[in-house]
Image (cartoon, rainbow, N blue to C red):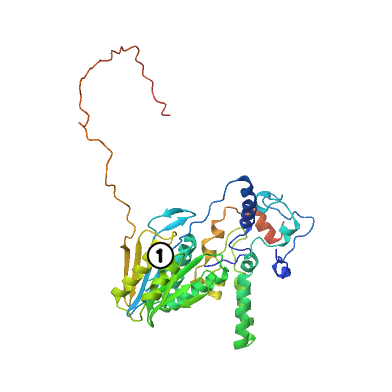
Amino acid sequence: MHTDLSETVIVFVSFFRNALLERDVAKVGCSLPGARKTGTTICGVVYKDGVVLGADTRATEGMVVADKNCSKIHYISPNVYCCGAGTAADTEMTTQLISSNLELHSLSTNRLPRVATACRMLKQMLFRYQGYIGAALVLGGVDCNGPHLYSIYPHGSTDKLPYVTMGSGSLAAMAVFEDRYKPDMEEEDAKRLVRDAIAAGIFNDLGSGSNIDLCVITKGKVDYLRPHDEANKKGVRTGDYKYKSGTTGVLSKLVIPLQLELMEESVQTMDTS
Amino acid sequence: MNTRGLRSQLKDSVPVAGLCPQAGAYGVPDTLRRGFSSVKNELLPNHPLELSEKNFQLNQDKMNFTTLRNIQGLHAPLKLQMEYRAARQIQRLPFLPSSNLALDTLRGTDESIGFEDILNDPAQCELMGEPHIMTEYRLGVL
């Protein structure tokens, strides 16, 4: 599927021009557009029968909320899902690329894909681009060896842990995890723990907000709960400034008809040629 | 600018004096994309990843062949390189993009998707070489 090119696929000439522009634009007084980031709280936890992944749903573009309900839990394969933090386009493209590759690989091996395979593919690709692809991921799933949870950093390092958090709200979420995590929890406890961790990120971090999405992966079943909890509902207006008709009483009425004379009548056909 | 290890950051081909170094389209210096001409611009790469990406496939092949040589002996990479050379010669007419199917199958990249399949697809290129001139050049008639 690849072609033997003598030049690179990714051409770096524009990078130089952008660097020049960045230096000069500051003198003029404008600013270059920034990439849309997800400024996020994502987390995952391994419980008795599988893995629970959680994410908030706010996407920011600088200091403005770009998307109030974006989906940060991406599909990788029927038994593996991945939450993404960092630059939104990078996480989106990376997860889609790895999902396609994993599908081809599983067709070739004729087996359900493993979480470790997805993790290895992701880390090799991210390391190849030396951190310039800004994708911090929480990868979780259940395969033939049981439930697994990985956190993958933009430069390509990975950690295999029972509970992980990533994103700008990761410290708030990790505080909740460190306090209440127990090994081999039940499903309801695990869902409540993840929901509380994401809520901590939403309420204490400006980069995270809106709703909480959950994804519960067990052997043979995936529950994609979107939204699981609407933590920040838009307020409903309690009052109304419109006056009902008849509020002002009518004291007197005077009607003056306007006399108009027909002066000239002409027809102009439209030019429909 | 970090001058340590500068040798490794230099491009592997230095432009010959007399030819326009910052040439874009039409052969004149492309100021919009490359800025004003300077020696630093010619020698240093535009982006830290530029050199590693340009040589990525070569380095992968070298690594694979070395591993294969260490495991199976010299004959294995030699035979494979002969097959690669043969597969690389299967091309379409000079102005048309080739699928390189045999080469992909040998490399094992027919079962994976990368950025080279999505971005900068030569089949979608807006420019095309002049067919008659290119075929005549290839045949040596020009």
Q: Residue at x 63, y 66 (%)?
A: B54
Label 1, on which residue? A201
Residue nearer the viewer, B107 or A216: A216
* Amino acid type at mark 1: Gly
> Quadrant of the rendered structure where residue A59 is?
bottom left
Residue nearer the viewer, A176 or B109: A176
Number of on-image labels: 1
Quadrant where the C terminus of chain A is found in the figure: top left
> Quadrant of the rendered structure where residue A172 is?
bottom left
Res A81 visible: no
Res B44 visible: yes
- Image coordinates for residue A13, horizontal then vertical, percent: 63, 57
| Location of residue B101 with respect to A267 vertically, above or below | below
Residue nearer the viewer, B75 or A153: A153
Instruction: Decide if residue B111 is on the left or right side of residue B136.
Output: left
Instruction: Decide if residue A56 is on the left or right side of residue A91.
Output: left
- Image coordinates for residue A263, horizontal then vertical, percent: 34, 11
- Image coordinates for residue A264, horizontal then vertical, percent: 35, 13
Residue extending furthest toward the right? B18
| Location of residue A116 with respect to A21 vertically, above or below | below
**What element does badge 1 sit on?**
helix
Q: Residue at x 60, y 66 (%)?
A: B91
> Quadrant of the rendered structure where residue A197 is?
bottom left
